[in-house]
Amino acid sequence: MTDSALVADLYDCSDPEGRAAGLDAAAAAIGAGKLVLLPTDTVYGVAADAFTPAAVTGLLAAKNRGRAMPVPVLIGEASTLGGLVVNLPPVANDLAQAFWPGGLTLVLEHAPSLAWDLGDAQGTVAVRLPDDDLARDLLRRTGPLAVSSANRSGRPAATTAQEAVDQLGTHAAVVLDGGPRSAATPSTIVDCTGPVPRVLRVGVLTVDELRGVVPEIED
């Protein structure tokens, strides 16, 4: 752990002891309804317990972001997806098998029994399995997390822990420093709630890559 003027606890996760202590602290913070800054395989993110509405509200407030842009959910294992959605369309399953873990976010109808409030999502949830060991280690401890890029709305995404701290450090209880991210490119988002999957945002995966798995996908 190192001191920071802006946050209570910042952990250097390149060190095994720091990583272990950071994961313990981050899991405890999430359990207490607080926010955590952490690396993903794309950019740094700000995370809250997906099933604690007040924590998600705090995440949106920290980013100065309205409910019209619901917060995506990260999971630690692909098998978790089945418990979050009403049904898993074959095309979504094919895309997940091809590109998870990685930079693919799938929009699906979530199970109505789930006690969460991620914003005005109209019964849907955007789910991703990140290709980052540190993030997945935390997710395995906490369960699904609501995670958005660690930046104020309208500002560049954070590619280092320090950039994340500079923007959202005063709102977070714990920061996990996993080193710099190589690029500020976000995930590619595919809506699988309709009869034909549709690309909502092109990110690290191109439309051609997606069509290599699901030829009928629309952009």
Image: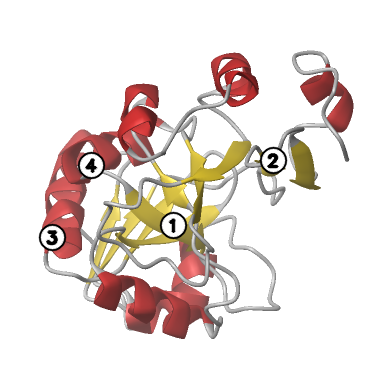
Disc 1 marks which residue?
Answer: 147
Image-based side of 130 in relation to 151, left or right: left
Real-space Cα separation, disc 4 to disc 1, in angstroms: 20 Å
Asked if disc 4 and disc 3 are in contact, CB closer than 8 Å, the reply is no
Q: Nearer the viewer, mark 2 or mark 4?
A: 2
Instruction: Give the SS element for disc 1.
Output: strand
Q: Is residue 63 left or right of residue 213?
A: left
Q: Where 114 falls versus 48 (above or below)?
A: above
- Where residue 93 sits, quadrant-wise, is top right
For marks 2 and 4 on the same chain, the one whose residue lies earlier in the sequence:
4
Of marks 4 and 1, which one's residue comes earlier in the chain? 4
From the viewer's perspective, tell me whether residue 45 is left or right of residue 66: left
Q: Answer whether labels 1 and 2 touch (C-beta < 8 Å).
A: no
Three-letter amino acid code at the position of disc 3? Gly
The residue that label 2 is drawn on is 194
Q: Position of residue 40 (x, y in %)?
A: 48, 44
| Residue located beneath label 4 in the image | 19
SS class of the residue under badge 3? Answer: helix
